[in-house]
Image (cartoon, helix red, strand yellow):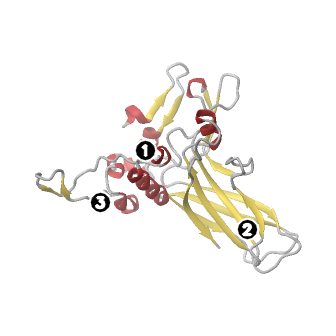
Amino acid sequence: CGNCHNVMDPKSGLMIEHTYDEWKKSVYAQNGLVCQDCHMIPVENLEETARTMKRKDNPGQASEIGPERPNIHNHEFVGGNFALTKMLGGDKQSGIAVKRLKLAASLDLAAPKKVSPGAKTKVTVRVNNVAAGHNLPTSLSMLRQMWLDVEVTDGAGRTVYRSGALDKNGDLGADAIIFNSSVLDTDGKPTLKPWRMVKFDYNRTIPPRGSAARDILFTVPKVLKGPLKFRATLKYRSFPQYVANDLLGKDAVTVPVVDMVEKIV
């Protein structure tokens, strides 16, 4: 697996993708779980495998004339890439990828039980990597987008705070809390072109069984109706909308988004 999932730029020596190394340093590898134990099993077995750190066997026949075996591997090799497979007509594979994404993480949301109109209030969201044997997101993490969509509404359903919503062009605002990486070119500018990458600026991906907490501060409106409701949704898409526009032309395709997990208090 490492032959394809550790990618190094031959000129700069930068390891652009290090999914294999992420797994190799993880608790999964320490417990003897290999890539095939998650990516060559039915997606329905993934949650138990990640929770117990033991492969759940998948009994069956490798072929119609083969013997019954205690464990067989499927050859779907589905990860989190649901966007391109769906665009190419692979609805089955895309559906499996969506299921995997929805199992990969959990959220904790801490919000105050009482608020005062006009006061500053803090909400803390913790993202937990619970079922991925590598970082979230992984692969070309500078291209992937996994972010928090946080919304606070009052008793009348009025939005009093929002962060992480897509704008009319399908792009994320600068205030969005995103878990990804950033890579710089020789001029010290961020780039998504692999052949221009020379060093990482930051890496905010979440390691296996790891977590990342983010605080959100906002001012409660002075005029408030009813109790506040806090909602956090972890969202994912394989690449930004502006990348699709650059490659295929504006409005050629809308990059799909998956709601991985949601928490409401």
Of the numbered discs 3 and 2, the one sitting upstream in the chain is: 3
Which residue is nearer to you in this view: 69 or 94?
A: 94
Of the numbered discs 3 and 1, the one sitting upstream in the chain is: 1
Q: Which mark is residue 54?
A: none
Amino acid at the residue labelled 3 = Lys
Amino acid at the residue labelled 1 = Trp
Callout in the foreground (3, 2): 2
Per the model, the C-alpha gap separating discs 3 and 2 is 40 Å
- Reading the image, the residue beneath label 3 is 56
Which residue is nearer to you in this view: 148 or 127?
A: 148
- Is 52 above or below relative to 249? below
Residue 210, image x and y in percent?
53, 54
Residue 140, image x and y in percent?
53, 38
Mark 1 residue crowding within 10 angstroms, few (<14) / some (14–19) / many (20+): many
Per the model, the C-alpha gap separating discs 3 and 1 is 19 Å
Residue 89, image x and y in percent?
42, 47
Which residue is nearer to you in this view: 165 or 125?
A: 165
- Reading the image, the residue beneath label 2 is 152
Callout in the foreground (1, 2): 2
Circle 2: element type: strand
Amino acid at the residue labelled 2 = Val
Spot the residue most to the top. Answer: 11
Callout in the foreground (3, 1): 3
User: Relative to residue 209, is residue 181 drawn left or right?
Assistant: right
Of the numbered discs 1 and 2, the one sitting upstream in the chain is: 1
- Is 115 above or below relative to 83? below
Circle 3: element type: loop
